Image: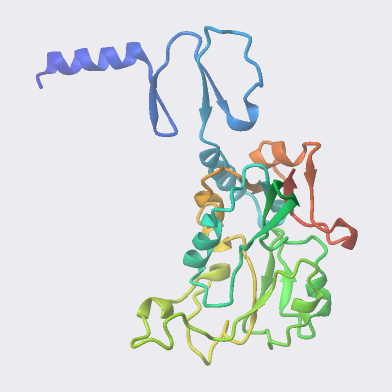
Amino acid sequence: MNSKHKKGRRAFIKKAGITTIAGVSVANFPGTKVYANQDMPEDDPSLNTMTLRKNIKLQMQEDVKRALKKPSEERKWGMAIDLRKCIACNACTIACIAENILPPGVVYRPVLKKEIGTFPNVSRKNTPKPCMQCEKPLCIQVCPVHATFLRPDGIVEIDYNQCIGCRYCMTACPYEHRVFDFGLYYTENTPQQQEYEKRPSFEYGKEWERDKNKSPIGNTRKCTFCVHRLEEGLLPACVTTCIGGANYFGDLNDSKSQIIKVVGKSNVTVLKEEFGTEPKVFYLQ
């Protein structure tokens, strides 16, 4: 392409004002407005205005990166789940298992399914249930060796090397979220145990080899909000894979974050509020 054609192409692009949003290229015609999902007005009075949604997941990832610029004690990670959007596809469950290389019996992101009503007038309520990352966690109070603790950023962590596997925390958790790692493998009793099951996991930003004589085998385990991803500026695996866009995540101490715009709504609840644990996982009904 000669220089004349190059200049002509650049001039055309500049004049057209091509804008790329969430992987879609659109001409920035006069009057075009771009909104983040939560800022989208319910009714735009201008019929001549093109209105575009900026991908909410990209917005939340920007929120995570902004939060990481602050000291850990100044951020507070939280999650919100819109139950109206959850279709119980279990994409979040599978993504979590793959991301954290979870063995049989260890599930961090179950989706509870409940049928409501009497046939033929029935509906189904789907409730994804990660760790609530409580502000006042009961699991911490009962641990005899202080193996579980509340991080400055609001995540409840388990020190696998300190945990003795007594399972008191499993009994204390009102959400029945914690599970025990018995050291099982999916392919253990098959002709050949597969190497992919022996890969190390990177929970809490540390490398954990899969060995029957090492942690986290013999320990209690739970959802970590994929903190190893967060510290790299990425969203938790369950959030990125939700096909219905039911998950919101971010810093509860950031007034500009997308999650703050969600948890302030009137239809937001938490599970088992009567226990006084102050969960940092919220539900939109």
Q: Vertical placement of 119 versus 148: above or below?
A: above
In this view, 69 is above or below 150: above
Is residue 252 visible in the rendered structure shown here? no
The answer to whether 1 appears left or right of 22 in the picture is left
Compared across the picture, whether 25 is left or right of 241 comes to left
Q: How is the image coloured?
A: rainbow
What's the residue at 58%, 82% (across, down)? 216
**Residue 197 placement (x, y as % from top left):** 42, 78
- Specify whether 112 is left or right of 239: right
Q: Quadrant of residue 39?
A: top right
Q: Is residue 205 above or below residue 55?
A: below
Identified at 55% across, 37% down, the residue is 56
Query: Where is residue 7 shown, x and y percent of the image?
Result: 20, 15
From the viewer's side, name the closer residue of 222 and 105.
105
Counting labels gives 0
* Residue positioned 74% across, 51% down in the render: 116
> In the depicted view, which residue is nearer to us: 253 or 112?
112
Horizontally, residue 130 falls left or right of residue 243, namely right
Q: Work out which residue is located at the far bottom of the displayed protein and give it.
A: 213
- Of residues 10 and 118, which is closer to you in this image? 118
Q: Nearer the viewer, residue 246 or 68?
A: 246
Q: Is residue 235 visible?
A: yes
Which residue lies most toward the front here? Answer: 120
Q: Where residue 202 sits in the image (x, y, percent)?
A: 50, 70
Give residue 149's position: percent from left, percent from top.
74, 72
Q: Quadrant of the N terminus?
A: top left
Residue in the picture at 62% in, 65% down:
224
The image quarter containing residue 176 is bottom right
Residue sitting farthest toward the left: 2
User: The C terminus is located in which quarter?
Assistant: top right
